[in-house]
Amino acid sequence: MEAAERDERRLSARHEAARLAAEGVRAVAISWVDNAGVSRVKTVPTSRLPQAAHRGVGMSPVFDVYTSDDAVATSPHIGGPDGDLRLLPDLERLTILAAQPGWAWAPADRYDQNGLPYPACQRQFARRMVRLAEAQGLEMRMGFETEWVVLKDDGTEGHAGRGPAYGLTRVAELSDYLLAVHDTLAAQGIEVLQLHPEYSPGQFEVSTVPADPVRAADELVLVRESVRAVSLAHGLRAAFAPVVVARQVGNGCHLHLSLRQNGRNLHRDPTAAHGLAATANIFLGAVLDAMPALCAIGAPSPASYLRLIPSHWAGVHRCWGIENREAALRLVLGEPDDLEGGHAELKPFDAAANPYLLVGSVIAVGLQGLDDGGPALPAPVSGDPAGRGDQERLPTSLGEALTHFERSGTLRAALGEALYGAVLAVRRAEAEALAEHSPEALAEATRWRW
């Protein structure tokens, strides 16, 4: 980072600090997401924001090999007590936290002490992949569904509310709480598409308006922490883990994406089947082909595989279908007269994933598919793939997903050796540490990690 850019950041941060102080903000949380999917943080007084924006806030590189239970792994490039990095807050994403009076938040990009981009920074990895797509005239919009289970914060961890799945009763039981979630997100500039009860006891889901991939990942972090803060203010706890209670339907974090090229919606080609232009067909075909390896990024915990059960709408078969909620890739056609409509939904992923790693990895494999000229999507599947007997099952364990991940030269090249090695080290450590856990013990061990 050049000196002139640093000085510009400091000047901008002075204006932002004055604005925040006038709004009663006394501290800023500067966060990043590690390779285990855990949001880590350093906080600074509002008055120190200009210094943080100019020189960054120190942190150790070792956090990149932390596991979700705070054990420390090691990798060929990262590990041990040596070294220091600088967290630089993204001032364009600086947000006053409506549910945490006196606080603001900003996501961080990470640099070394010489001002050079840190090779294992997941947020900068996602941005690099977006720029590669833009160089081909591709624009992507992405959005996440955030699912969580609301539990009582009274030591019992009982479910808050007794209403049925998708039931209006749940809204009546927790109407003040849900209004507070709506109000908090709106106050922070996050536009909600819908918020509704889900299948498991006490489970809810919120979907937000699509954005560019890096912003979508930022908003996922902010949505989750906002829901957590609102829950605590109402005497509740929000659990985002892949499975909160063993043998119940778990929490997904589905990724939605749409593609445009040179201003043209690739989901509205009148000459193509289902409106899917050739570029989108090949991009999505490559994503589907790479789905077993992507599970190591998007379903990264041993607990993720408690959730990935056939016939539970978790998308556990490597197939696609038109509005098929059992397929790993669901093509959403949208309303025919909506010229901006149409997108794809990737269903196997959950909230243990680092969202920056996930959006960047999806873009990387899709772009590689375009470079290679395929594969395109195979024939669509209708109905439950589990009943057909001819559809490939996605990995049933983290170890199996890691085998596919290690075979993916595309992901290794895109991530770079430092980030790839750190991801692999964390996944191996978690797979080993939790290998002997029963489903009940695994759910309990991971319930509050995200």
Image: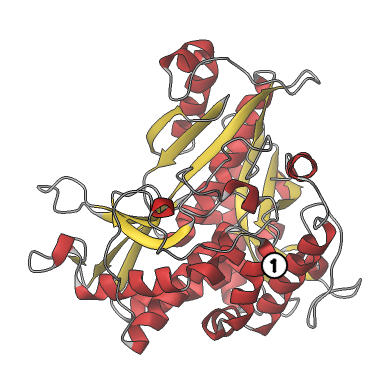
- The amino acid type, in three-letter code, at marker 1 is Gly
Where 228 falls versus 257 (above or below)? Answer: above
Question: Which quadrant would residue 81 be assigned to in this image?
Answer: bottom right
Whether residue 203 is visible: yes
Q: Residue at x 21, y 47 (%)?
A: 334
Q: Residue at x 78, y 18 (%)?
A: 154
Task: Give how far across and how far down residue 389 sits, in percent.
Answer: 42, 59
Decide if residue 418 is on the left or right side of residue 22.
right
Label 1 packing within 10 angstroms: few (<14), some (14-19), many (20+): many
Q: Residue at x 49, y 19 (%)?
A: 164
Q: Quadrant of the N terminus?
A: bottom right
**Which residue matches tag 1?**
399
Decide if residue 33 is on the left or right side of residue 287.
right
Q: Quadrant of the C terminus?
A: top right
Task: Give how far across and how far down residue 32 sits, in percent.
Answer: 66, 57
Task: Give how far across and how far down residue 10 sits, in percent.
Answer: 62, 61
Seen from this angle, which residue lies furthest right?
Answer: 81
Question: Which quadrant would residue 119 be assigned to in this image?
Answer: bottom right
Q: The residue tagged with tag 1: helix, strand or loop?
A: helix
Could you say which is closer to the camera, residue 396 or residue 73?
396
Task: Give how far across and how far down residue 208 sits, in percent.
Answer: 41, 42
Could you say which is closer to the camera, residue 197 or residue 415?
197
Could you say which is closer to the camera, residue 244 or residue 396?
396
